[in-house]
């Protein structure tokens, strides 16, 4: 831990992992080669071990099949013309052949471009992703083929060289690619440099603005796996005592970095991954019971640009309200003043910054956004607002872009007002935004979803908050009761839609 002191003599820290063993060296490998080597060890112990299973259909892939088919599909992609540095768009529901496709494309030296199946504004998002990434090949789920073809028809002629179909009896299918003689599985591809070669391109809005293509390298992917392996080796398995080869259920789209991470971490350890293509509460509960799922949700924090989680509650006593745990191996965290960049000390809130070997290469074709996110010293400015305490536990309290400047431009955290509203027995959900006035000051406005048949008026909720906060924090923008709060695919409120009043209003004050 690096320390310094401010002018008041208060100690300021750069937080880092405080483990009992030194951190290992990160191998300089193609991620597909790294995973094939790890899965081959699983096969040595059990050549019938199940790697991934579809909870709806029962379709399975074993570790043996993955180890055999990845080099064959890699050869099939090469025969089709997919080369080093090419971009392959992947647009699919969660499917058991995702690890096969992903590792085969990377083994070939190409890049997976993720299109989430639950993007808002689908056609516009797909067009943006295709143009930004320069994808010239595509793999599309059968259930999504009509949507994809509608977008493809709008692209300039010959943009796509070929489209393969996954998850249905539609030709040409990805199965057509596995009938080739295998490329040697653990041979490093000539010309591929893991630190600079892009493995995947998911999309993120970053700290602000429209979706950006996040360039994640092979080294980023390998670093993340080494971090997980180290945690298991030192028996700091996120506060649990279960075996690392336990059964894991993933319900979030595999286009999201969280599910992608845990899929390959589970496979590295020889664990079974259970996938749900169509998610519902009843399906989740049924799947947990039928497959005896042991791992589902962890208290972790990270971001797409980090290709990983950066903090986690690795022991159960770390858990506290708003706490995201301690720094993970290979990571450094500091808190700085958002305006001056000055390093802050314990219990002093500011912007959380992170540095790690998992940090993205940058945003595709957007050097300005990259330089505003990653500074010259390699620190990622996350846009998250929070602090750390004397124990090194880190807390998130808000997003910097969501902070409101109310009377006299005093900063107010929406989360503080949201937490107050949620203390009312009739409030089920609450989101607070700032509504701009002509002088650029903001009035806090609350959007709430009530419990069923709740007998409460918006004015009552407004007084409930205003009686408990100083003048500059009061809900001067009113309270809107709505049917539902719009959210993105990961459950985050879409505050831009709320600012634009794109919501069904039931009552307001």
Image (spheres, grey):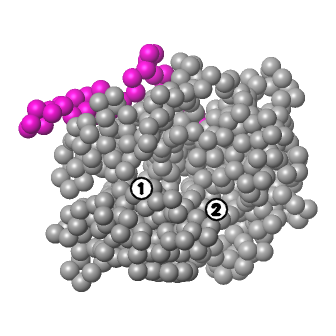
Label 2, secondary structure: give it: loop
- Residue extending furthest right? 169
Residues 9 and 316: in front is: 316
Q: Residue 419 got which mark?
A: 1
Any magenta on residue 15? Answer: yes
- Residue extending furthest front? 455
Using the image, determine if residue 271 lies above or below residue 107. Answer: above
Neighbours of disc 1 within 10 Å: few (<14), some (14-19), many (20+): some
- Residue extending furthest bottom? 438
First in sequence: mark 2 vs mark 1: 2
Q: Residue 318 got which mark?
A: none
* Residue designated by label 2: 116
Residues 500 and 114: in front is: 500
Q: Residue at coordinates 47% horizontally, 75% vertically from top-left?
A: 457
Looking at the picture, how far across and down is residue 136, in whole percent? 66, 65
Snapshot quadrant of residue 224: top right
Snapshot quadrant of residue 65: top right
Looking at the picture, how far across and down is residue 387, in whole percent? 31, 43
Q: Residue at coordinates 79% horizontally, 35% vertically from top-left?
A: 292
Label 1, secondary structure: give it: helix
Q: Residue at coordinates 81% horizontally, 62% vertically from top-left?
A: 165
Using the image, determine if residue 147 lies above or below residue 346. Answer: below
Neighbours of disc 2 within 10 Å: few (<14), some (14-19), many (20+): many
């Amino acid at each position: 831990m690096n320390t310094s002191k401010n002018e008041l003599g208060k100690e300021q820290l750069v937080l880092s992992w405080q483990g009992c063993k030194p951190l290992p060296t990160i191998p300089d490998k193609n991620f597909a080669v790294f995973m094939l080597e790890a899965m081959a060890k699983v096969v040595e112990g059990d050549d019938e071990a199940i790697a991934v299973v579809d909870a709806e259909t029962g379709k399975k892939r074993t570790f043996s099949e993955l180890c055999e088919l990845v080099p064959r599909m890699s050869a099939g992609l090469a025969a089709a013309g997919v080369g080093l540095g090419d971009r392959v768009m992947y647009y699919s529901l969660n499917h058991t052949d995702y690890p096969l496709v992903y590792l085969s494309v990377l083994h070939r030296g190409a890049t997976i471009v993720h299109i989430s199946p639950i993007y808002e504004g689908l056609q516009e998002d797909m067009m943006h992703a295709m143009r930004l990434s320069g994808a010239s090949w595509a793999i599309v789920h059968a259930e999504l083929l009509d949507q994809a073809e509608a977008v493809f028809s709008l692209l300039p002629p010959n943009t796509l060289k070929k489209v393969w179909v996954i998850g249905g009896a539609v030709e040409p299918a990805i199965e057509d690619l596995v009938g080739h003689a295998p490329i040697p599985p653990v041979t490093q591809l000539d010309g591929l440099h893991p630190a600079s070669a892009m493995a995947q391109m998911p999309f993120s809005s970053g700290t602000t603005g429209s979706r950006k293509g996040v360039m994640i390298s092979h080294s980023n992917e390998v670093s993340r796996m080494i971090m997980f392996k180290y945690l298991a080796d030192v028996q700091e398995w996120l506060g649990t005592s279960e075996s690392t080869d336990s059964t894991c259920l993933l319900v979030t789209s595999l286009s999201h970095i969280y599910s992608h991470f845990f899929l390959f971490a589970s496979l590295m350890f020889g664990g079974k991954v259970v996938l749900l293509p169509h998610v519902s509460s009843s399906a989740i509960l049924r799947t947990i019971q039928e497959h005896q799922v042991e791992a589902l949700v962890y208290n972790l924090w990270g971001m797409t640009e980090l290709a990983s989680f950066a903090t986690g509650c690795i022991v159960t006593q770390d858990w506290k309200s708003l706490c995201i745990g301690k720094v993970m191996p290979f990571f450094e965290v500091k808190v700085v003043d958002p305006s001056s960049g000055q390093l802050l000390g314990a219990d002093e809130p500011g912007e959380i910054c992170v540095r790690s070997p998992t940090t993205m290469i940058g945003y595709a074709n957007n050097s300005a956004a990259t330089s505003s996110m990653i500074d010259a010293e390699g620190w990622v400015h996350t846009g998250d607002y929070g602090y750390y305490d004397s124990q090194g536990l880190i807390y998130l309290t808000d997003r910097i872009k969501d902070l409101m400047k109310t009377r006299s431009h005093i900063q107010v955290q929406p989360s503080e007002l949201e937490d107050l509203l949620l203390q009312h027995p009739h409030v089920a959900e609450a989101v607070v935004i700032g509504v701009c006035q002509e002088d650029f000051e903001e009035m806090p406005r609350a959007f709430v979803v009530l419990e069923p048949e709740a007998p409460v008026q918006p004015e009552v909720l407004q007084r409930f908050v205003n009686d408990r906060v100083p003048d500059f924090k009061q809900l001067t923008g009113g309270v809107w009761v709505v049917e539902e709060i719009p959210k993105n695919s990961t459950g985050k409120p879409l505050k831009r839609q709320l600012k634009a009043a794109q919501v069904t209003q039931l009552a307001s004050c």
